[in-house]
Image (tube, grey):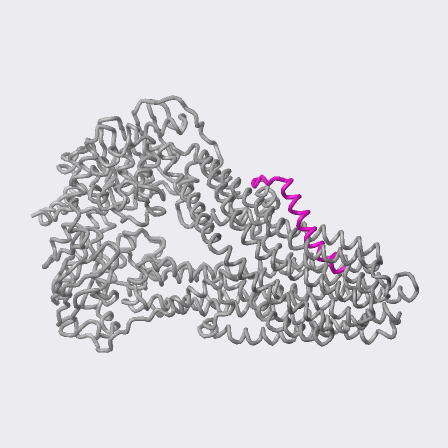
Amino acid sequence: MRPLDPRLLRYARSARGYVALTAGFGVLTATLVVCQALLLAHALGGAVQDGASLASLRPTIAWLAVVVGARALVTSGQERFAHRAATATITELREQVVEHAVALGPRWLASGHGPAVVTLATRGLDNLQPYFVRYLPQLLLAATVTPGVLLVVLGLDWVSAVIMVCVLPLVPVFMVLVGRLTQGRSERGLVTMQHLGAQVLDLLAGLATLRAHGRERGQGARVHALGDAHRRATMGTLRIAFLSGMVLELLTTLSVALVAVAIGLRLVDGELALTTGIAVLVLAPEVFLPLRQVGAQFHAAADGVAAAAQAFAVLEIPVPVTGTEPAPDLRRVVLTLDGVSVRTTHGRSPAALDLDVQPGTVVALTGPSGAGKTTAVEVLLGLVRPDEGAVKVGTLDLADIDPTSLWSQVSWLPQRPVLEPGTVAAAVGGVHDAAAALTGLDAVLETLPDGWQTELGRGGEGLSLGQRQRVALTRALVSDAPLVILDEPTAHLDAAGEAVVLDTVRVLRAAGRTVLLVAHRPSLVACADTVVEVRSDADAMDPAVPA
Amino acid sequence: MRPPTGTLRRAVTLLDVDRRRVVLALLLGTLALGCAVALAGTAAWLIARASQMPPVLALSVATVAVRAFGIGRGVLRYLERLVSHDVALRGMTQLRTTLYDRLATGRAEAVLRLRRGDLLARVGADVDAVGDVVVRGLLPIGVAALLGLVTSIVMCLFWPPAGLALAACLVLAGVAAPALASRGARISEQRAVQAHADMTASALGLLDDAGPLLVSGRLQREMDALRAADTRIAVATDGGAPSAALAAGLGQLAVGLAVLAALLTGIPAVGSGRLAAVDLAVVVLTPLAAFEATALLPAAMIQVHRSRAAAARVLALLDGGAGPSPVLDDPRRPLPDLVAGDLTCAWPDGPSVVEGLDLTLRPGRSVAIVGPSGTGKTTTLLTLAGLLPARSGTLRLDRVDVSDYGREAVTATVLVGTEDAHVFGTTVLENLRVARGDVTRDEASAVLERVALGGWLTGLPDGLDTVLGPDARTVSGGERRRLLVARALLSPAPLLLLDEPAEHLDPATADALVTDLLRDPRGVVVVTHRLSPLDAADEVLWLDGGHVRARGTHADLRRTVPGYRAALELEGAGGAVARP
């Protein structure tokens, strides 16, 4: 793990100011630590050795009080800004990750990256909070207080400085050594732990199913056994993981003890003044404190650093370049897929698909589930780049076309309709009673408290899937886009709902618009002018699918 | 909204921690940090005494002690961490097991609810959070209290005013500062809850529906919504920051105040001979090391607060699952004769979805339930299986009310296979064996062939031993559905209730599968929305608007119900084209 990734400063502007500010606070803290030690040593040394009175030490103690107050203020200020900077950086990275992931397109998101990016954006990046608030300040203190105080100690008493300088490099050396030794083991342990944890959750998730089968009993013992195995695996990992912490504490406390003993022995010989001795004794732990804190916060910070690294990894994937040519008018030109294939982990899906979408016709894509019908639509829209074959809009290559100029001519109803929060009227794009009567939305509106003005939640919350589909269908109907794409528009509808979709398709065709259907049901296929069968490599091998 | 008092105590009781281990961890933790305090005190004594140039022998005990404390701290702390983590992990296992056992025997709807939303993921995290309270909350608090008490008493023995001042400063750093810190954390959290939910919804929406949003040109608006939610999170976080800042400052200030108090009271005492000069060094320098334990308390308080909230949710789940738990051991095996009379089906806190349902099921008889989606067909099946209580009407098995039987007796007779049933993260074979422990490999292959999964099975890398991902994210929707049907078919129960077994299949395969299921010698209820294969059913129930609109044989309905005929013709017309 890199303690401070330069990419963090590059991608998150809010992090830059914060790091500079924290470094400044670090220098200030170092100065105050030294002042405090010297003032304290002066007051205490005077009182212990020379029997100085309170009156004579009053100025020293007053200054000490000022330094104590100043340290409290600096600590307070650091904390105040740390929270703000953490939140600002997290939100900055989150927006960039989401924007970039969306730009990378649905295929990238669908190929296993989607859930990871969702977790990263909504929860993972929040782990940067402890990194910014706890770890980074200590890291910068280790870079300011540790060397600064060490220099002062060197000036006061070189023997103590030598002891500390000898121990100091041992800290990272031992940390790395222990880290190396434990890494393999703790990674294995981590995998076991996650596996066992997932199994417990799996049993819990399946409890309803086990109950339906009358097999829920005896599983409690299994949960307990899994938990015990989880504990043993975890403890095995922790036994080694905590070693690094122990080495760190051992080295730092022991060196303070050695410094104290060395000072004591030289005081007896009269080689050292008590004031110097006290100052060095007070300063010695301060040299190691930031290092110890860095070690203590390491694990909390590691999650944040890992999340940030994931974010950078996403941000560094280049976004495919899009074309700049304006798309031709879809009412006039033919959309063509020529031998298009998209590779997946299960072979090509679709495989070598040829498709002509003539303006003003109804084209149906059919084929078994998993054949790549939806992917074919996404290829046609320029959301997915084909691995083989060509996509043409008229005579132009789709890759040369500015996608927004194509999209503005398309109304697309995906399998799961996407509705924005707001009223039904806003989702449809105005009050259209005639269209609603055609798509069956009128029946849905009757059941809603405020009809067209009913507020829907995000994604059409408050409506069933079939009802949402009618809203989206109405929107497709009233839009004036020349090309309407309906992906399984009858999937969540019964026979009556299906009839509604068929009527809608007929009206669209009568209006001279081009309709591309993804269809399972024969009734829908029947109303198409052209039917194109989509096949994947897997279908070619699967005998269960009738040809 | 604060959880009721006693919530955390109840949850910690459920952890069933071993008291001896907790005491051991507490002692080890106190001794570890005590070593650091003792190191500071002894070192101060050592150099103050040394400055008086006594014979070196007079210092030998102190020099040995200083080194011993230097070593003791690291070693003791290591042991303490091991003991405390062990305690916490044991507690979590105990809590998980208790939770599982209570849910397994409690009310069924509490379990069915588990599958909804993110509840499940939360249960895992919540149990961990409750367990964490031991290591990160209660133990640091105990160590700080014990160590603070002991340190103050020892300092009082040297010089009472300095000891009392130290005690006061420890209270400032150990009580006031953590209270402020947890207040700050609470403020930020409360204010950010809604903003955080909005942010998550926006980010999810953007990433799930990137394509449609791009094409419809609504992407920018959604990005703006995300930014707005993020801004509100930032404002909320800032609301708690002043308290956190004040707490951090107070913690730092307390150390300085304790040192200053020792100096101001100790110096005149040395002058007047009431305090030895060497002891002054001890009472002034020891406080510098005495605040390490209290420095951990703000984080500990925040952990306690978090754990309490988690405990409230876990307890709510436990209490929700508890209830008039049915008898488990019911040796009766009722005859497979299920009769519903005027049955109303509903979730306990939801509206009635189906009313006035009459249905008879016995082996050899098949019933198809058809109707628009969203009409509560799944709820109906769960009610018929006795997993949800009937709101009104009767449901009798072998002429006795279903609720009179133990779960075992009912599940041995009636099996419901819902569409959201769980596919376990284990092999295909083990998943099928959920239905019956002794399913052979041949039986498994045969049943998969029967539900048109033969080709799928051939394509699996390890055949029946292929491990499916958690909740079968690696299989397609249609394959998953048929796997569940296969499992239901393997069950020994003589009555089967199946939910949309042929969803996601092409019409020909779907009709063949439904026909086959309806002809099964057992008693079968099939929920479906395709009408073509229903000639094989003894009776068809047409649900609409929460009532049975029509019932009879397929032929009867086709003849007498115009809507049924129209729907059928729609399917049929298309079917002719699809199968030229």
Q: Nearer the viewer, residue A216 or A449?
A: A216
The answer to whether residue B190 is visible is no
Residue A406 picture location, percent across and down: 22, 71
> In terms of secondary structure, what is the magenta stretch mainly?
helix
B131 on left or right of A317: right
**In this rendering, is residue B360 above or below B116?**
above
Is residue B27 part of the magenta span, yes or no? Answer: yes
Give the image quarter of residue B360. top left
Question: In front: A283, or A130?
Answer: A283
Extreme residue in the left direction: B580
Q: Quadrant of residue B229?
A: bottom left
In this rendering, position of residue B432 left or right of residue B26: left
- Left or right: residue B402 versus residue B508 is right
**Vertically, is B356 above or below A121?**
above
Residue B148 in the image: x percent, y percent?
Answer: 73, 54
What residue is at 84 percent from the left and 58 percent from the top? B58
Mark yes or no: residue A496 visible. yes
The part of the chain drawn in magenta is B14-41
Residue A67 drawn at (x, y percent): 73, 73
Q: Please identify the residue farthest to the bottom as the structure is shown.
A: A325
Say which of B180 and A118 sits in front. A118
Q: Is residue B529 magenta?
A: no
Say left or right for B34 vs B122.
right
**Residue B576, percent from left and from top:** 9, 47
Question: Which residue is pictured at 88% across the width and 61% down the height?
Answer: B275
